[in-house]
Image (tube, rainbow, N blue to C red):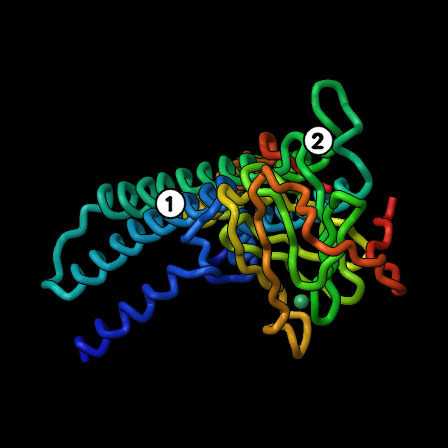
């Protein structure tokens, strides 16, 4: 039984790598988020350890329990300290990953069940289905909209996630350190084909930006692709 | 004097956490409303209307906890112990969960 339990460990750890893993960051923002993830794991591990020790102790003979140590020392102050540190870490990271200062702006428009992206090109805006082109090595703000239900834009290796809400325009900052292809997905259940609502982000060498090789697609016909957000 | 386990005593027991929960919900609602109505841009002296609006329910909650703490002994006599602890929990939880409101960025468009 024990062996069977341990046998699943490599399987579980395999989920930590790969193109859709927050723990394989490929840019400074995703790096911050991964760091926060590890900080939260450490905090959770400390609290879990306390609980396991308490459970283990309960199997022994009944004994005198010093309230000062167990109830206040560990139960209150230790737990509060762990929670305070993780809260501070979350606030710190949360502020850092906000869109501060100027950045290149691209658009992501969601609908059931696909994404349309547009970015400034050599000859005007470029639109593409399912592929977002960005320059590597600089921050990019994705302006996220939706035409039907709530979706969510998420590229785990490049940044956080942000909902696409009908009637609103949300802003999410992402950044890829190096050129490459990164996978993205819709992270808010949005109907039957939600799971297939995937996309790619291609980060280009800054020297080749804006990419001239991309075809300039004609503006998409109605429904208007990027409705103006409400004032 | 109220009995341990009676409805009145139960009310005193959950007063602290309830006051905290109410303040939290009100602050949560006002936060969303303020972002939509542009309160962060309206300054009230040194701070924005947004921060004042979110902080006020917490201040009210702390005040309510302090008032109840001052009365719990008279109301419950020897049974005041655990309700008093509950009120302290409500007060400290309000301070703890509302403190980030004073420093964190409030809205992003
Ligand atoms: Cu979706």
> Which residue occupies 10% across, 63% down?
A61
With B2 as the anchor, is B46 left or right in this view?
A: right
Q: In the image as oriented, which residue stretches furthest toward the front?
A: A213
User: Residue A39's mark?
Assistant: 1
- Residue A115 left/right relative to A181: right
Residue B51 at what x, y percent from top left?
A: 68, 32
Residue B52 numbered mark, or none: 2
| Residue in front for this viewpoint, A148 or A221 | A221
Expressed as whole percent of the image width and height from the top left, the position of residue A6 reads 21, 71
Question: Of helix, strand and loop, which one carries label 1?
Answer: helix
* Numbered circle sitting on residue A167: none
- State the SS at label 2: helix
Determine the residue positioned at 80% across, 36% down: B38
Task: Name the chain under label 2.
Answer: B
On the image, the x and y values in percent for residue A3 come to 17, 76
Badge 1 vs badge 2, beta-carbon distance below 8 Å: no
Query: The numbered mark 1 sits on a residue in which chain?
Result: A
Q: Is residue A121 left or right of residue B63?
A: right
In the picture, the quarter occupied by the C terminus of chain B is: top right
């Amino acid at each position: 039984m024990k062996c069977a339990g341990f046998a699943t460990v490599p399987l579980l750890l395999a989920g930590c790598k790969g193109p859709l893993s927050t723990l394989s960051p490929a840019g400074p923002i995703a790096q911050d988020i991964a760091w926060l993830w590890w900080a939260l794991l450490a905090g959770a591990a400390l609290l879990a350890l306390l609980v396991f020790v308490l459970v283990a102790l309960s199997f022994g003979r009944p004994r005198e329990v010093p309230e000062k140590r167990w109830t206040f020392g560990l139960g209150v102050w230790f737990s509060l300290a762990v929670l305070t540190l993780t809260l501070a870490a979350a606030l710190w990271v949360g502020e850092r990953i906000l869109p501060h200062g100027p950045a290149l702006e691209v658009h992501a428009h969601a609908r059931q069940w696909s994404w349309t992206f547009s970015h400034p090109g050599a000859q005007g805006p470029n639109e593409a289905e399912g592929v977002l082109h960005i320059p590597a090595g600089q921050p990019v703000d994705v302006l996220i909209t939706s035409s039907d239900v709530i979706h969510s834009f998420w590229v785990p290796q490049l940044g956080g996630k942000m909902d696409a809400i009908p009637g609103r325009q949300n802003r999410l900052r992402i950044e890829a350190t190096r050129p490459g292809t990164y996978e993205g997905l819709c992270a808010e259940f949005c109907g039957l084909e939600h799971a297939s609502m995937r996309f790619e982000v291609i980060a280009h060498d800054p020297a080749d930006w804006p990419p001239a090789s991309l075809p300039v697609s004609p503006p998409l016909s109605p429904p208007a692709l990027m409705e103006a957000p409400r004032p | 004097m109220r009995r341990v386990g009676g409805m009145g005593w139960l009310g005193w027991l959950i007063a602290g956490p309830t006051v905290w929960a109410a303040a939290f919900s009100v602050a949560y609602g006002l936060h969303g409303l303020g972002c939509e109505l542009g309160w962060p841009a309206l300054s009230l002296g040194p701070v924005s209307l947004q921060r004042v609006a979110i902080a006020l329910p917490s201040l009210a909650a702390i005040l309510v906890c302090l008032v109840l703490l001052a009365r719990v002994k008279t109301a419950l006599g020897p049974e005041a112990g655990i309700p008093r602890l509950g009120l302290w929990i409500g007060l400290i939880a309000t301070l703890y969960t509302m403190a980030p409101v004073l420093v964190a960025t409030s809205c992003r468009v």
